[in-house]
Amino acid sequence: MLIAVKGNTQLKIDDADRDTYLKLGYDIAEQSGNTLEVVENSSSKKVSWKEYEALLRENEELRNQVAESGSGTSQAMKGLQTQLDDANKEIKTLKKQLSDAEAAKKSAADDK
């Protein structure tokens, strides 16, 4: 059973009526426990030009921030890979030290 949602209106509908309600401006949702989960938005929904321009500006600002920081460049990715490789080496070393310490502790306990 699907639910058509528009504003505060919620109507239980059959799957066959889905397209009709979408054309009327309803979103289609499914009930998941006590919450509604929208599975398809109406194509009649519009974003205002003001919101669109604000999102364009924000997108451009974020792209500039990424470009200035150098994130995502191949050089930055190589640097991150080097850090990851170093961290993995350190983990192996620490695991070996832990294993050796546990073996020494067990050996000392066995000697008593």
Image (cartoon, helix red, strand yellow):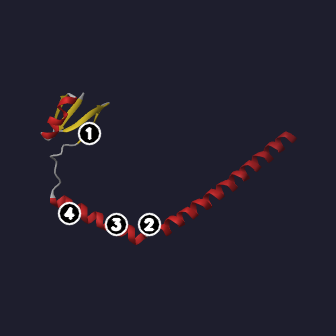
**Dot placed on the residue nearer the N-terminal end, 3 or 2:** 3
* Figure quadrant of residue 84: bottom right
In-image side of 19 versus 73 (left or right): left
Are the residues at dot 4 and dot 2 in contact (C-beta closer than 8 Å)?
no
How far separated are the C-alphas under marks 4 and 3?
Answer: 15 Å
Crowd rating for badge 3 (residues with CA inside 10 Å; few <14, some 14–19, many 20+): few
Residue 53 disc label: 4
> SS at mark 3?
helix
**Dot placed on the residue nearer the N-terminal end, 1 or 4:** 1
How far separated are the C-alphas under marks 3 and 1?
Answer: 30 Å
Please name the amino acid that badge 2 sits on.
Ser
Decide if residue 102 is in sight here: yes
Please name the amino acid that badge 3 sits on.
Arg
Return the residue at label 1: 38
Residue positioned 78% across, 45% down in the render: 103
* Residue 18 placement (x, y as % from top left): 19, 34
From this viewpoint, which residue is outermost toward the left?
Answer: 24
> SS at mark 4?
helix
Crowd rating for badge 1 (residues with CA inside 10 Å; few <14, some 14–19, many 20+): some
> SS at mark 1?
strand
Please name the amino acid that badge 4 sits on.
Glu
Residue positioned 16% across, 61% down in the render: 50
* Residue 24 placement (x, y as % from top left): 12, 39
* Residue 86 placement (x, y as % from top left): 62, 61
Residue 99 disc label: none
Please name the amino acid that badge 1 sits on.
Val
How far separated are the C-alphas under marks 3 and 2?
Answer: 10 Å
> SS at mark 2?
loop
- Report how many numbered discs are placed on residues in the image: 4
How far separated are the C-alphas under marks 1 and 4?
Answer: 26 Å
Return the residue at label 3: 63
